[in-house]
Image (cartoon, rainbow, N blue to C red):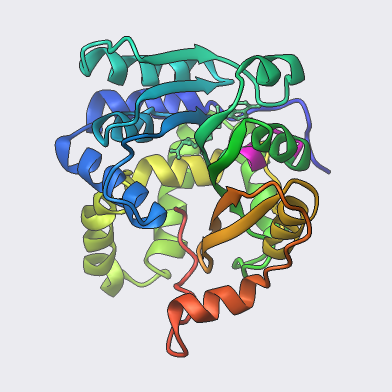
């Protein structure tokens, strides 16, 4: 039975990450992931709204990429502190604001106005009301603007099962700090190493190279994966059908096969486009393209 009252301390995890792990290399990786998925060299000419900014690393990357105005908000006060920490280190630029806010708060979201690039990576499925959060988030995208989101996918064959992970997340939030620590090593042993010591070198390599994927840290993401609650899965096609059918978007890029599917939409103002996600994935990856193994990122 899902526990609706409990919440993972996302911000504690992000604070630890920015204070202990932040580096130029991670920032470069975050910027590369942004420009790679957006298929742009920079963010000049765009303003950037970061919904659920977490560490703030991707807001900082957007700043470095030349975004003209930035606003980052997060529900969790500690995520706000982490994002402010990075903003302060960047010299407190006037055109980057950071505050606490809730994407489920209709009047707060309405007060934000519209933006040319709205970014919400790995957030909306952690609100407890993923579809309402998605509807609110899309309302911030300007006409012709871009909407870059990532959502835990219902279409991925999670091992052992999607329901298993929902239970684990609730368990992680109930237990003591010591048991949380043990659960992290249980995860590494069971899923990272497949319970075989000979896989240790491969896991060590994964831990080391993890920073090159969106600039994240392996253990920060493992804790986020084990504890990230509330949490829902969203169907890839369901997401596209909602945004194209009701909100005048067209899908222009997609990446599936990892725990989170990534989507890039452009607001055309015309409802009813019917992009088939599987066809687009096949077109983008070619016949040899196959989904990568499920990864916590
Ligand atoms: C998994 S983290 C992702 C952080 C960041 N977007 C990234 O890509 O690294 C999810 C973040 O969403 C935030 N969040 C959860 N519910 C929210 C809500 N209702 N409104 C705004 N942020 C929320 C959490 O506090 C957390 O910082």
Number of marks in the rendered image: 0
Occupied quadrant, residue 219: top left
Considering depth in this image, is 125 or 226 the residue closer to the camera?
125
Give the residues drawn in magenta, as a range. 124-129
Q: Residue at x 57, y 50 (%)?
A: 266
Q: Position of residue 48 (x, y in %)?
A: 44, 30
> Residue placed at 76% from the left, 42% from the top?
131
Residue that sits furthest to the left in the current view: 24
Q: Is residue 98 left or right of residue 268?
A: left
The reply to whether residue 53 is in sight is no
Please tell me in which quarter of the rendered image ligand 1 is found: top right
Q: Nearer the viewer, residue 194 or 220?
A: 220
Return the residue found at the far right.
1
Whole-percent x and y of residue 283? Answer: 51, 80
Nearest the viewer among 159 and 238 is 238
Magenta region includes residue 16: no
Q: Residue at x 60, y 59 (%)?
A: 251
Where is 43 relative to 202, above or below?
above
Query: In this rendering, is residue 277 above or below 100?
Result: below
Q: Is residue 72 left or right of residue 273?
A: left
Q: Residue 98's quadrant in the figure?
A: top left
- In which quadrant of the rendered view does residue 23 lie? top left
At a point 26% along the width and 68% down the height, the residue shown is 202
User: In the orientation shown, which residue stands out farthest toward the bottom?
Assistant: 287
Quarter of the figure that contains the N terminus: top right
């Amino acid at each position: 039975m899902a526990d609706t009252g409990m919440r993972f301390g996302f911000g504690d995890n992000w604070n630890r990450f920015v204070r202990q792990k932040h580096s130029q290399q991670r920032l470069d990786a975050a910027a590369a992931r942004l420009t790679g998925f957006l298929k742009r060299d920079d963010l000049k000419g765009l303003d950037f709204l970061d919904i659920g900014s977490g560490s703030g690393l991707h807001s900082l990357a957007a700043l470095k990429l030349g975004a003209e105005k930035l606003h980052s908000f997060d529900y969790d006060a500690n995520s706000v502190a982490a994002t402010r920490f990075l903003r302060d280190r960047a010299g407190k630029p006037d055109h980057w604001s950071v505050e606490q806010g809730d994407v489920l708060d209709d009047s707060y979201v309405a007060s934000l106005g519209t933006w040319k690039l709205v970014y919400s990576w790995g957030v909306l499925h952690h609100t407890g009301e993923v579809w309402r959060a998605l509807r609110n988030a899309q309302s911030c995208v300007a006409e012709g603007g871009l909407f870059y989101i990532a959502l835990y996918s219902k279409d991925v064959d999670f091992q052992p099962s999607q329901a298993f992970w929902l239970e684990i997340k609730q368990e992680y939030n109930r237990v003591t700090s010591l048991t949380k620590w043990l659960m992290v090593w249980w995860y590494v042993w069971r899923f990272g190493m497949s319970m075989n010591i000979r896989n240790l070198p491969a896991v060590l390599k994964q831990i080391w190279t993890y920073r090159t994927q969106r600039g994240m840290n392996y253990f920060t993401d493992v804790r986020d994966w084990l504890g990230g609650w509330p949490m829902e899965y969203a169907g890839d096609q369901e997401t596209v059908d909602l945004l194209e059918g009701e909100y005048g978007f067209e899908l222009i890029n997609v990446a599936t096969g990892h725990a989170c599917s990534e989507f890039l939409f452009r607001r055309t103002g015309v409802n009813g486009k019917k992009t088939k996600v599987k066809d687009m994935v096949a077109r983008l990856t070619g016949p040899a393209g196959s989904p990568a193994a499920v990864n916590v990122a």
